[in-house]
Amino acid sequence: MAACCILAGELLHNIKLIPYYQKSSCLFIRWISTSKFQCSSQPLEKSTLQQLVGVVGLEIHAQISSNTKLFSGSSVQFLAPPNSLVSFFDVSLPGTLPVLNKRCVEAAVMTGLALNCTINKKSVFDRKHYFYADLPAGYQITQQRRPVAVDGVLTYSFLGGRKRNEVMRKNVYIKQIQLEQDSGKSLHDDVNSQTLIDLNRAGVGLMELVMEPDMRCGEEAAAAVRELQLILQALGTCQGNMSEGQLRVDANVSVHRPGEPLGTRTEVKNINSIRYLARAIDFEIQRQTEVVQRGGVVLNETRAYDSKSGETVAMRDKEGLQDYRFMPEPNLPPLLVFEDEASLPAGVEAGQAVLLRTLRAGLPELPSVRRDRLVQTYGLLPEHSFTLVNEDGLMEYFEAVMKGTSRDPRKVIGWVTNELLGLLKQQDLSVSHSSVPPAALAELLELQEAGRISSSAAKQVFQEMWRSPGKAAPQIIQERDLGLVSDDANLHQICQKVVDSHPDEVRAVRSGNQKVLNKLMGLVQKETKGRADPVLVRKILQEKTS
Amino acid sequence: MLGLTLKEVSLAFREGRISPTELCRKCLNRIKKTQRLNAYITVTEEFALKQARQSEARLLQGVPKGPLDGIPFAVKDNFCTANIRTTCASKMLKDYTPPYNATVVQKLLDQGAVLMGKTNMDEFAMGAGSTDGAFGPVRNPWSYAASYRTQAGSASDSDWVITGGSSGGSAAAVASCTSYLALGSDTGGSTRNPGALCGVVALKPTYGLVSRHGLIPLVNSMDVPGIITRSVSDAAVALGVLQGADVRDSTTVPAPSALTELPEDFDVRNICVGIPKEYHAPGLSEETRAQWSRVADLFEKAGARVEQVSLPHTQHSIVCYHVLCHAEVASNMARFDGLEYGHRSEMKSSTEVMYASTRHEGFNDVVRGRILSGNYFLLKQNYQHYFVKAQKVRRLIANDFRDVFGSGVDVLLTPTTLSDAACYHDFTQEDNRTRSAQEDVFTQPANMAGLPAVSVPTALSQRGLPIGLQLIGPALEDKKLLCVARWVEQNVGFPSISDCENTQESRKDPGATRREQASAV
C-alpha cells in the first residue's frame, strides 16, 4: 500500500507541474516541448558533422488490459489490498502450471497488427532466471526466442520547424512485441531492514515492445510514446497510465558522431510520465556529451531518473555478471495464431483459437487515421487535429458539438481547444468531467451564429455555464442581460460619444489607416460590455469617420 | 484379501465379503506391521477411515462410484494433497502442506478411492534407489520374502535390498499389500524401475495423457504420473480414471479412447514385437537377458512376429537425458527460496544470504549438484553446446522410435533394469549420479520420446528377487500396450509375493496371511 501511496503522491506532484495554457492551441505540443533540448529537424550541415548527437531506443512494458493475469485466473486491479489477488500459481506453489490467457494473446496480436508488425503464427515461451524477492518462481516466463509479433513500425508526428507549427512525421521501428509476466512489488523498509512483498502484480500480462534506436532526443521519444499510448488506448489493449505503471518506459541512450558506430549506452529507468521521459533523455544525452567531450568514457550502466532534481543517477552496473540462463518453458505448448477459421487444423475449435482475420476486422480507428479524418472532414489545421486526438475524449466532444451547430468547424475548434480545454486544465479535469456538455456548448454557439449575442458575450456566458452546471445559455443571457445591443439609436449615441472623445484616432482613420477603426470598435464594445452587434457598430463608425 | 487385485476387491465389496472400512483397517494394520520398509512418509489414517466409511455408506446404498470406490491407494510424496503434508522427501518441504490436490489425486478421491498415505522416495525424485531421501531409504518387501531369505541365509537384517527409485515407496506399498494402487512419477524410469525391482506392474503412460497439475516437477517435459498395481488390468482401470485433458495442464491431450476394460479378444498373433539390439547394454545381467529372451520366445511360439530392430541413437540418450534433466531441475528448483513456503534458514543478514543458506540447508547434495550442473548447461556460453545439442539428440531418439513403429512394429520388448535389486550396502558404494546413469539406461529413452511404457514382473532371479521386462508402445497406444502387457503377465507365471511370504511374518498374522495366500493370483 505504501508504494501505491507514493505513486499517487507523485501523480499529484506531476499535475501541479503541468502549466496552464489557456491560449495554447495545441497543448500536447507545448507540453512536450518543455524539454530544454530540442532535436534539429534540419539536415546536418558540414560544420555540425563532428557534433555529438543522441541516439535513443526504448523498451516499453505495457500492462495488458485484462480481467485476469497472463497465466492464472487471479484478478488484475490497481490499488487492491496487498496480496489479495494471488493465486496458487502466482505465488509459485510447487506443482502449479501456467495456463495461457487468450485475452492477453489477442491484445498482443491486436497491438502487433496496429503497429504493422508481422505476427508470428507460431511463437514460444521461455524462462528467464534471476533471483529476486518479488519473482516467486525464480524465473519470469517471457518470449525471448520467438515473440508473438516482430518487425513493426510506429509512425508518430510532432510539431517542429522554426515556428514549431510544421507537422514532422517520423518512423520508429518496432523490433518485437513479446508477452511476459509482470513481477510483484518489493517494499524495502530500511528502518527495520526488512522487505515486504506484494504479489498482486505478479503474473499480470505485459507486452514488452522493443523500439529500435531510431530516435534522437527526448522530444521524439516522448512523441513516439504518446502516439503508442493513444494507439493502445484506442485498441483497449492497455490503459496506458504511466503513473500507475500500466505503461513503463525504459530508455536506452547513447551519443555518437553521425557516421560513426553507436556509443556505449546507458539504460534510464524510473520514468513515470511522458514529460519526465523527455527530460530524462535530454539530461542523459547532455551528460554523456559532456563526458565524451571531457575525454571520458560512458559506462554501460543502469541509471534512475530523479524527477525532483531532473537528473539521472547511476543505479548499478549493467548486467555484466547477470546471465539469465534462458530456456524453453516446458509447460506451455507453442502459441499458435491462425489466419481464419478455414485454416484451423482438425480438433481446434474456432472459439478457442486466436484468429487474425477476426482481430484485424475488429481494429478501431487509430489516432493517425482520426487526425487525417478530422482535417479532411472539418478542414481543421493539422495541429488542431493533434490536440483533439491527443487529449482523451476531446475529439468525441468536438464532434458532438459539431452535430448541434452549423458554425464553421474552424470557429468551433477555438472554443473547444481554448475555452473548454483551458478551464479543464485549470481545474485539472478530464474532458469527461466537463461541466458543460457538448450539446450546451452547441446551443450557445447557435445563439452566437444567429446573432443573438456577440462573441465576447458568448465567452462570458460560457464561463457562467461552467460555474453553474445545468444552466442553459438563454437563461444566462437573459439573467445577465448579455443579449446583443442592436438598437440603432442607442448604438449611434455610443459611437458618437467615442468618436467625439478620440479625435486623433478619427483623424488617423480618415487619413486611410483603417486599422485604427478596430480600436474605436473596441472602445464601443467596452462601453456596451461586449454586447454590441459588431457588424452594426462597424457600419456606424465607418459612417461617422468618413 | 490384501493380496487380491483391485478388481477382485471391488467385486468382494459388492458381494459383501468385506467392507471398505474393514479393508482399510487391514491395510492400516499392515502398514504398521511393515513399518520397517519405510514405504510411507505420512500415513493418513484418520482421513482414510473417514473416506472408507463414506465409501461403505455408498456401497450399502448400492450407489458405489465405480471400480475404485473403497480401494486403498497410496500416493508418492511429490503429488500435492490438500491439507496433507507433501515433502518430496526433502528438508526443504518437510513441513509443507499444500492447499490443493493434484489432478490425479483428486480424480482418485472423486472415484471414492481411499488414500492411505504419502510414500517415500528419493529427494525431489532425483535418484534410482529410493535411498536418497530426507526420511531414509525404502526397503524392498522382497528383502523379507522367503524366496530371498532362504537364498540370503542368515536372519541378519543387513542384507536387505533396495526398491529402486525414485518411486520406491509406492512400489513397496503395492508389493507389500498395503495399497492396491499407488501413484508414482516417471521422469527417466522412476516408476518402472522400482516396479521391476519390487515385482509389480508399473505403467508410464504417454506424455500428456495424464495431468501433471499438482505433481511437483522434476523435468516438466518428461514427467508423467505413473501407475503401480499388482496386475495389468488394474493399471488399465486406473489409467481409465486418470487419463484425459486437464485445463490446468496445457500439455495434456484428450484420451484417444475410454479405457475401462481391456478387450478379451486380444490376439497376440496379430502383433509384431521389436527387440532393439542396442538394448544389449553393458552390465546387463545374464539372468535378465535370459528372461528377455524367454519372453521373446513366448511371443514367437504364440504366433506373434518377433523382429530385431535398431534404435541407433540409444547410446547417446542417457547423457542427453542428464543434460536436459539437470537444466530443468536448475530452473524448477529456483522457486525454493524460503520466502513463500518451505524451509527458511535462520541466517537472514541479507536476502541473498537467506537464499543461499536456505537452499544449502534444504537440499541434499544430489539436488544441489544437479542445480549446479544444470545452471552451467544453461549459461549463455554453454547453452548451444549442451542444451540445444541435447534437444537435437532428443529429437533423433524420438525419430528412432517413430521409424521403428512406422515400420510395422507394435511394441518393443526390452529389459527394465540391468539386474535384480541390489543390496543397500552394495548400491550405496556408488554415488547417485553413477547409479542414475546405470539404472535409467533402458527406461529414459521412452521419456525422451514421450512414449508409453510398462514394466511387467516376469520371474524371480536366483537370489529370489523379481526381474521385470519393459514394453514400449507408440504414443497414445497405451491401451494396446496394456493388452500386450497383460498377455505377458498371463504367460510368464510370476509368483505372488504372498506365496513367498516369510514364514516368520506369516506366523505373526496367521489368519490374514493364509487367506491372502489362498486367494492370491
Image (cartoon, rainbow, N blue to C red):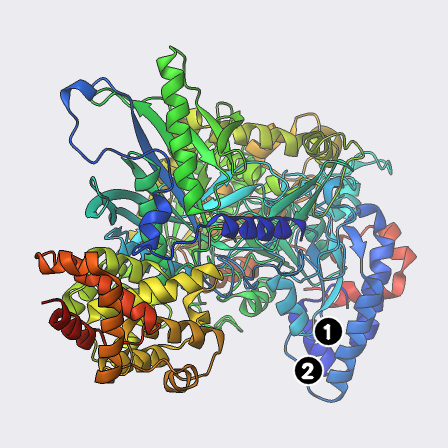
Crowd class of label 1 (few under 14; some 14 to 19; many from 20; radius 10 Å): many
State yes or no: discs 1 and 2 in contact (Cβ < 8 Å).
yes
* Image mark 2: chain: B
Label 1 belongs to which residue?
B70
Label 1 sits on a secondary structure element that is loop
Identify the image quadrant of residue B427: top right
Q: Nearer the viewer, residue A428 or B504?
A: A428
- Label 1 in the same subunit as label 2: yes
Residue A73 is situated, as x and y percent measured from the top left of the image, at 55, 64
Q: Nearer the viewer, residue B38 or B490?
A: B38
Residue that lies at the very extreme toward the top in this rendered image: A295
Image point (54%, 49%), residue name: B223
User: Is residue B362 toward the left or the right of residue A161 in the image?
Assistant: right
Callout 1 amino acid:
Gly
Residue A511 in view here: yes
- On-image quarter of the C terminus of chain A: bottom left
Callout 2 amino acid:
Pro
Residue that lies at the very extreme toward the right in this rendered image: B508
Residue A9 is situated, as x and y percent measured from the top left of the image, at 60, 50
Label 2 belongs to which residue?
B64
